[in-house]
Amino acid sequence: MSVGFIMLCHTAFDRAEQVARYWAERDCPVVIHVDRRVGADRAEGFRAALAGLPNVAFGPRFACEWGTWGMVAATQAAAELMLARFPDVRHVYLASGACLPLRPVEELQRYLDQRPHTDFIESVTTEDVTWTVGGLDAERFTLRFPFAWKRHRKLFDRYVRLQRRVGYRRRIPKGLVPHMGSQWWCLTRQTLSAILEDPRRPVFDRYFRRVWIPDESYFQSMVRLYSRNVESRSLTLSKFDFQGKPHMFYDDHLQLLRRSDCFVARKIWPQAERLYRTFLAPDHAGSAMAEPNPGKIDRLFAKAVERRTRGRPGPYMQSRCPNENWENGRTAAPYSVFEGFTELFENFETWLAKSIGGRVHGHLFAPDRAHLAGEERVYNGALSDSAGLRDYDARAFLTNLIWNTRGERQCFQFGPADNQAVSWFMALDANAQISVISGAWAVPLFQSNVNFSEIRREAARLQKIEGEHLSILRTPHLKARVRVWTMADFVENPMEPLQAIVDEISPRTARRLTEAPRMVDLTGFGRFLQNLKNQGMQPHLMGDFPVGEDPQEPPARHGRPYLVKGAR
Amino acid sequence: MGLWNSYRLRLKRRRWRLQALLKRRELTALADRTGRIGPQDILVFTTLRNERIRLPYFLSYYRALGVDHFLMVDNLSTDGSREYLAAQPDVSLWSAKGSYKAANFGVDWLNGLQMRHGHGHWVLVVDPDEFFIYPFCDTRPIRALTDWLDACEIRSFGAMLLDMYPKGSIRAQAYREGQDPFEIACWFDSGNYTIKRNHWMGNLWIQGGPRARTFFADAPGRAPALNKIPLVKWKRHYTYVSSTHMLLPRGLNHVYDEWGGEKTSGCLLHAKFLNTFAAKAEEELTRRQHYGASKEYIAYDSGLRDRDDLWCKWSEKYINWRQLEILGLMSKGNWA
């Protein structure tokens, strides 16, 4: 009892010949179908090359256009020839010219000998199919497809739409339940002959002739009528990408293929010399009775498809320039933006770095230059601190910084004096954690030594910018994690919000803050605001600071500020 | 895109093709071996001037990738480039008498040759200092890539220009003939690139890298473009518009995904910054034959006089294509 192979070939005949010879020399009959669209001389050369082998036969030729009946007709004819010419054959294995046996054929034979009545064919009902491209699954069986999908895509689509609109449905022959699956199967003589000798075969054939891609459904459906034991999987390792095109295997897949323990793989790149040499070598040994296990290859290709369709979160590059909101993450990793904190606390940046252990930058978008952590001139990824380069594309500066430093939390200061070009971008970025002490930009003005009229003008400018920024942060489309306090509120009780922010940045440490950052001296700040008001400006973002009632000095101004808190 | 725009682009493409036809008259064949080109051959098109020292490694690099034939235009070399190339069995060589600038920086000459010899072939257009790398280039020949692109019905393949530079003064190490230039210039900038979309032509405009960082910090808009589409399944009516930065018809410029995914892409390692560069910059300054009135060279010349070290502490040392993939400079896409 042996296994016979049907090979459907249309190109790379030298490789097909090698594989056919390999099987034939190991006592496995081979029936070959050559696409009728191949020129006579090439087909004849191929036939001549295999002429010396008595158990190789060539079937009648059909034109096999993709997705049409030709493939099935070719397979039927070749299968009939196989069953008639080689009575010893018990299993018939459908392969293509781009298939390559990965394990010695003796192992396949033994495997099949142990399962003499099993048909290996992937056969899934249309409701359960997930892989079809273009959304046509059940409709393959109920619509008509007179136009070639590859050549007349527009006509094809229009005709499908038209049929949907008028509610056209073909009738499925009685008793037939449409199934689909990989076209590469291995069936027993019993099942295959029952399909081919069925008295109703003309009915079924006439029906399937008009089904779209019948090579993925004819045998898959018919087998359900006759098989005693369907094992719904293909013995051929064949992966498809997101456009329904088969993945290719190359020399560098050698180890993966070897470890997959599959019997046959497709498609092999015709020039993968090392694969053909290794797997067709006479002394090539398999792994005895191992079950096929293509898990690793499945993962590899699934990842490739994922990369092509969703991409990695974060990078913008030459082959990935997502439209807005299609980024799969605007930035690569979470980061924190602090507004007004360095203004209100004297040593905020060092304090924060110590508390969270991440990287803390100054005002990255300051007008003079990007104040990178440690006042570096160049940063990860050779990102320059030049304001000119940064402002040329501020978004790219931010996304580059976050991408370049993946794995390390980035924090930076931001404020109304900075370039505001990234405001919207951050507000809509789920990775951004933005904490704002509104109005704190007034503190440096309060401490500054310039004429009051200039202070007044600058205060008006900054307040306007921050007001716009805050209204952006109130957008209903907000994705960022935003906290806003007025300066007056924050000064009342600085530790609780700080603790909340730090907890969110590094939730696992759950460290209680013991040391508070040192707040600047705000004595006279209320008076300062009143002076602004007296000059006709209305400072409102900082909250309420009554004149004369200076905020309580933080408890630890005279010594190290420790915080003692009870359980919340 | 409206009909009007399509029509304008079509006119533009016609004009470029006409120019190419006219400029083809400036070419004289010195060694025409195009009869040996087979129907499936992968072709390299190059224009050059005085690059003798680079040529041996250039040819051997692309031969090793599996390129079948080189079609080269020599613009009045005086250093023996011409004689060397004419003697190579897989090179067809033309000499161009006219001005490089008037021929749109060589584009017209090559467009003309591609029209005649490139039709139906995969065509790779590179300068002598550009080295094409693509996913799996260490294990798969370029034919594997083009076969896969054919199978996926992809017509053009993007490869960003990646400026490579040595550590220390670029004058410090002398490049020897036949040497791998990336033994010297093995550093690059990994994450300071900006991308803009050119909606009219549909291509991306990428800038950044060491040149923007050191020479163009005050005028980043003038920094050179790094986006390139060097590998195309050529058709007679295609035309490059500005170097290999963009093509017409504009669909060929669509080498990027807009819905979040990553298309497959490569890089052109740019071995410009070797000790040969300083001399070249001086020469080009007197010739004024380069893009934008040789602004680039003027900037380099003044920049290089005070500091000719492009290296910084965050420069990345080149290892292989996988490293560039991880850094997000190129992508395997769905090729696995």
Image (cartoon, grey):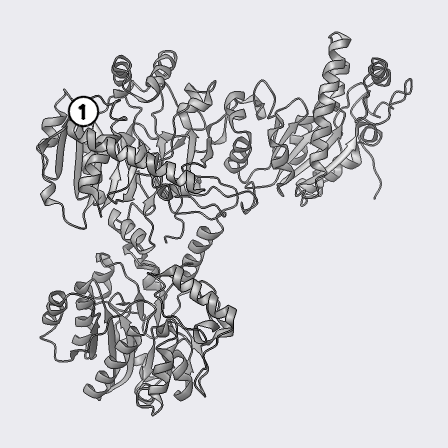
- On the image, the x and y values in percent for residue B262 come to 44, 47
User: As drawn, is A302 to the left or to the right of B25?
Assistant: right
Quarter of the image with the C terminus of chain A is top right
**Residue toward you, B330 or A498:** B330
- For the N terminus of chain A, the image quarter is bottom left
User: Residue at label 1?
Assistant: B75
Residue extending furthest toward the right:
A548
Please state the chain letter of the residue tagged with numbered disc 1 in the rendered image.
B
Local SS, label 1:
loop
Q: Position of residue A382 (x, y in %)?
A: 46, 28
Rate crowding at label 1 as few (under 14), some (14 to 19) or many (20 or more) other CA atoms within 10 Å. Answer: many
Q: Amino acid at mark 1?
A: Asn
The mark total stands at 1
> In the picture provided, is B163 more to the left or to the right than A531?
left
Residue B294, can we see it?
yes
Residue A307 % position (x, y) = 45, 51
Q: Nearer the viewer, residue A452 or B255?
A: B255
Q: Residue at x 21, y 77 (%)?
A: A31
Q: Quadrant of residue A391?
A: top right
Q: Nearer the viewer, residue B210 or A130?
A: A130
Res A346 seen here: no
- Identify the image quadrant of residue A530: top right
Question: Left or right of A146: which side holds A412?
Answer: right
Q: Please state the horizontal and vertical placement of residue A243, each as a whole percent of the image.
A: 40, 59
Residue sitting at x 85%, y 22%: A553
What is the residue that sits farthest to the bottom in this orientation? A199
